[in-house]
Amino acid sequence: QSSPVVLQSAMGNSQAKGDHNVALNVERQLKYGCNPHQNPAAVCRVDDNKTLPFEVLSGTPGYINLLDAINSWQLVRELAEATGLPAATSFKHVSPAGAAIGVPLTEVEIQAYEVKNADQLTPVALAYIRARNADPLCSFGDWVAISHEVDVVTANILKVEVSDGIIAPGFAPEALEILKAKKKGAFIVLKADSDFKPPELEFRTIYGMGLVQKRNSEVFDASKLEKVVTKRTDVSEQAKQDLILASVAAKYTQSNSVGYSKGGMMIGIGAGQQSRVDCVKLAGRKVTTWYMRQHPKVLGLKFKEGVKKQERVNARVRYIEGDQTELELKEFNALFDSAPAPLTEAEKKEFMKSLKGVAISSDAFFPFRDSIDHASRLRSQ
């Protein structure tokens, strides 16, 4: 049975004066809060809303699951509206590890992402594959959001990935059954309500204090790119698409946030750093890893039979980073029948010169040129 919780906070500005009563009607108990010891925990309907923004079709969501679900759903919905294409994102700890739209893969990407039956991929599946492969090391155990109905092709791809749950506006009947069977029924499946209208104001309480603000309803679309203030004014349609993608992703990334995008996908996201240039560098390191996964020596790694997919993902990243300890190197070499030759710094530097057409966006302005200088090393234009 629903039980109301009433929050009251006093507002003193010209737009929101007086007391605000917010009724939180407990709709569903959660496994626990942010941590296992934080009980009780529940998800609530707000005020007069008769429903939540989603319906639970399978599994038991937790507190962080729902934060990921709501933020990721807003991201893909806005991205799909701004680009006119299916969108997907891979969320971890309330920030995207990757986000993308449904555009075709190159032959090299098909090989680097270990894609099977590439000729059978749908736009929705393409968006998900790209989102997952922005940073597959971080996407391990992720939360997935997709802007369109999840089809069987996409469900079969998701079936073999290590993931906690998904939110989407709908599921093909067979796709839903595939996902409900994942993790022996523990995989969380949420059906988003596309018609849900969120309240204009958002409230939060912390340590006995109440906060209120207007919901961030600002949408980044092509209209935000009409005024180009730099000397160079020739912005291609691909660049505009990538700038929209990076800007929408940055909006739903914990600040400070900076993201690089290319070819319809995020290729590096830097989240939650106290210094903006550190975000640029963190995201830039991920860009380097993403692109180096397409290096011939990385593509040519011959793993032993039986090495699991995530082990291959992790091994490729460590091979690219190249700073293994003696013990790490021993474990790495054990994944192969014959130990691969190292990837040298000179080879990495030479290959990175071929990276072009990278877009970058930040959730706030760059206060110093150090961020721009670093981004330019990664061919941001």
Image: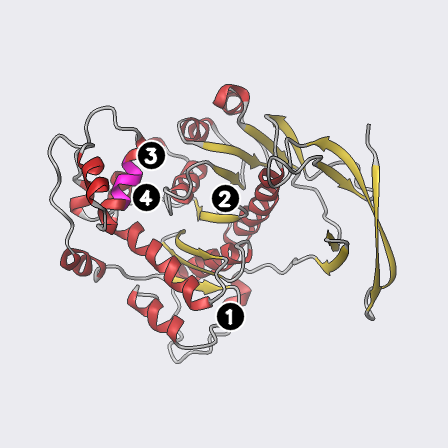
Disc 1 marks a residue whose amino acid type is Glu
* 308 in the magenta segment: no
Quarter location, residue 299 = top left
Q: Earlier in the sequence, mark 1 or mark 2?
A: 2
Q: Which residue sits at x=30%, y=40%? A: 314
By secondary structure, the bulk of the magenta-drawn segment is best described as helix
Report which residue position mark 4 lands on: 105
Q: Secondary structure at mark 2?
A: strand
Q: Which residue is mark 1?
A: 226
* Left or right of 322, for residue 49: right
Tell me which numbered mark, 2 or 4, is placed earlier along the sequence: 2
Which mark is in front, 1 or 2? 2
Query: Residue 281: horizontal and vertical position, in percent?
Result: 37, 63
| Magenta region, residue range | 312-317
For discs 4 and 1, the disc positioned in front in the rendered view? 4
In the rendering, which numbered label is found on residue 45? none
Q: Is residue 114 left or right of residue 49?
A: left
The answer to whether marks 4 and 3 mark residues whose Cβ atoms lie closer than 8 Å is no
Nearer the observer: mark 2 or 4; the answer is: 2
Residue 190 is situated, as x and y percent measured from the top left of the image, at 60, 32
Label 1 Cα crowd, 10 Å radius (few <14 / some 14-19 / many 20+): few
Q: Which residue is mark 2?
A: 91
Q: CA distance from mark 1 to mark 3?
A: 42 Å
**Residue topped by disc 3:** 310
Task: Specify few, some or many for label 2: CA neighbours under 10 Å numbering under 14, 14-19, or 20 or more.
Answer: many
Q: Residue at x 16, y 40 (%)?
A: 300
Gap in angstroms between the C-alphas marked 1 and 2: 30 Å
Q: Nearer the viewer, residue 177 or 152?
A: 177
